Image (cartoon, helix red, strand yellow):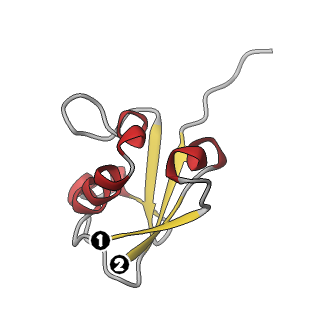
Amino acid sequence: MSTVRMPPILRQAVGGAREVDADGATVRELLDDLTSRYPSIRGHLLDDGGELNRFVNVYVNNEDVRLGQGLDTSVTPESTVIVLPAMAGGGR
């Protein structure tokens, strides 16, 4: 299983845990496992088509999956996956 680090805003959906374990060979499989155990988190992570929500960033071992293979990015049991809400800003 890989370790998934959850941001504070999503921790309530995973029982308050800072880190949860999830199983899968790709980010997609990992998120499928995670959302099957914590269904309320699905809408925060994935859009209606099952792709990453545009306001969520996912990193595998500090590499942004959007810059590589996206949800098809490989993970291993040693992988650390970080879920971060995208930051918006700019106004005063």
In the image: residue 60, left or right of residue 46: right
Classify residue 16 by image quadrant: bottom right
Per the rendering, the mark at residue 1 is: 2
- Front residue of this view, candidates 36 and 30: 36
Q: Quick one: label 1 or label 2, which is nearer the N terminus? A: 2
Q: Position of residue 33 (x, y in %)?
A: 28, 59
Image point (46%, 46%), residue name: 57
- Front residue of this view, candidates 78 and 43: 43
In the image: residue 48, left or right of residue 52: left
Q: Secondary structure at mark 2?
A: loop
Are discs 1 and 2 less than 8 Å apart at CB?
yes
Per the rendering, the mark at residue 87 is: none
Please name the amino acid that badge 2 sits on: Met
Q: Position of residue 11 (x, y in %)?
A: 59, 50
Residue 19 higher or lower than 44, as above or below: below
Please name the amino acid that badge 1 sits on: Asp
Image point (18%, 32%), residue name: 49
- Tell me the quarter of the image containing the C terminus: top right
Inter-mark Cα distance, 1 to 2:
5 Å
Image point (70%, 22%), residue name: 90
Return the residue at label 1: 23
Residue 76 higher or lower than 53, as above or below: below
Q: Position of residue 6 (x, y in %)?
A: 55, 55
